[in-house]
Image (cartoon, rainbow, N blue to C red):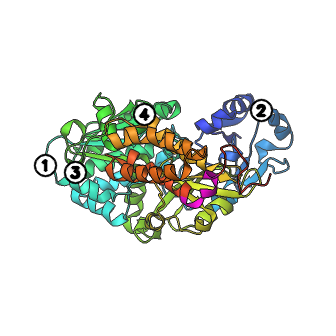
Amino acid sequence: MTIKVFIPQDSSAISVGANQVAAKLSEQTGIDLIRNGSRGLFWLEPMIEIETDAGRVAYGPVTVNDIEPLLEQGLLAGEQRHPLCLGLTEEIPFLKNQQRLTFERAGVIDPASLDDYKAHSGYQGLERALTMSSQACVDEVKGSGLRGRGGAAFPTGIKWQTVHDVPGEKKYIVCNADEGDSGTFADRLQMEADPFGLIEGMTIAAIAVGADQGYIYLREEYPHAHAMLNNAIDSAIAANLLGENILDSGKTFNLEVRLGAKSYICGEETALLESLEGKRGVVRAKPPLPAIEGLFGKPTVVNNVLSLSTIPTIFAKGAEYYASFGMGRSRGTMPFQLAGNLKQTGLVELAFGITLNGLLNDFGGGSATDKPLRAVQCGGPLGTYLPESQWGIQMDYEALAGIGGVLGHGGVVAFDTSVDMSEQASFSMEFCAEESCGKCTPCRVGAIRGVETIEKVRNDDDRDANLVLLNSLCNTMESGSLCAMGGMTPFPVKSALEHFSEDFYQPAGSTKSGEQS
């Protein structure tokens, strides 16, 4: 009897030795070794799963030196005697307590196998979409309440409707896979664990708006995702799921992967389009919107990986089903990404509405250093720093906006009491100075002046006057910058000043007031 053994080929798992563990186990006879995607429980990687009659049994984190003892204690039989045994995978609390819709196949299937994808409800959504009119497809997305899983959270259906309504024979679908926010990895995990989900979502989008060409603008630093996507595209073409006359429907959709330019600003949709056209990645003035004049001046849907990868679920299970999750105007689920100083880091997909405290403690397990947590940054490097008094906030676009917070791509980065928040404020300005496209003065010059001013404050160089200057500079950047790069850089700076002001009133590098010496 052949035993199925699953070891992730996700880049996070590979970085901690998954390939070596797989090579060691491949020496065993009688096993079918499957390189799946990660489940997103990164603190347990590399995690091995053994298929048993009761379900998959997990072990982790496993090193090469653990293999022999595990084999001796019944690894291949799924026995649970070894200390690294985690029990049934689906019963691990971190995973069991999630509500996985977009990531329901992550870690479950062989991401390179089209047959495996289809066996887990893959392409049911596309088959349904092909029976619907283009307007009905757009209405389905509207009814789901899906919003962009990036910074602006713009309703996906409204964007599609705009492209649908603009006349023209040539339209494009562009996937923004230039994931660059600190503490985020959901796009990468999706592409490495379930690439057909993204491809199917883009194909449905093309049918809905009348596009025949698509591009995945992929961060160059994601070589494993690049290889996985190209292999999946080839498989989809061979199966008549991409290209000419898809499933004999008369519909055409061609798809290519294009590598990004190692620039954070190319995550902004208009800079991305400039780069995709072979130009320098700088922000375009709006209007016109990309939905009207986008790639090569044609109507273009620009959505990110998570938005497009959610489309197959909406079409397979229905808009009402998806909209039944969430709260208020935030419908469906959000893949939160836990990073920073937490015991349990990884991906947590839940309906909108869980509190930040719940994410940090129920899923994150609290501080990895056992020092108290002090600050949390949500929404990437341009998001605000939230103090403990705000961790009861529900993770919802409007709720966070109500306290000046940002949900963005769902990244959650935690800091313990050793953090110097004046240093974090300085980092925010440094990041903007490094990554600005340079097109507008408030961002290009403001960030440099911001770094200088914060350093003067930290070194007590006419501190009070420079605090006034810093606040004025932040206001100028917010109101005068062309895009969110400069317009949001003040958010983390101002939140650090508001909630952690004591760190700006002591010499740089000294013991923080929140930390025991």
Q: Which of 26 and 356 is in front in this view?
A: 356
Figure disc tally: 4
Residue of label 4: 263
For discs 2 and 1, the disc positioned in front in the rendered view = 1
Q: Residue 365: x, y in percent?
A: 71, 58
Of the numbered discs 2 and 4, the one sitting upstream in the chain is 2
For discs 1 and 4, the disc positioned in front in the rendered view = 4
User: Which residue type carries mark 1?
Assistant: Pro
Of the numbered discs 3 and 4, the one sitting upstream in the chain is 3
Mark 2–mark 1 Cα distance, whole angstroms, equals: 59 Å
Of the numbered discs 1 and 4, the one sitting upstream in the chain is 1
Task: State which quarter of the image contains the N terminus.
Answer: top right
Residue of label 3: 163
Q: Residue 88: x, y in percent?
A: 71, 55
How packed mark 1 is, by other alpha carbons closer than 10 Å (few <14, some 14-19, many 20 or more), is few
Residue of label 1: 167
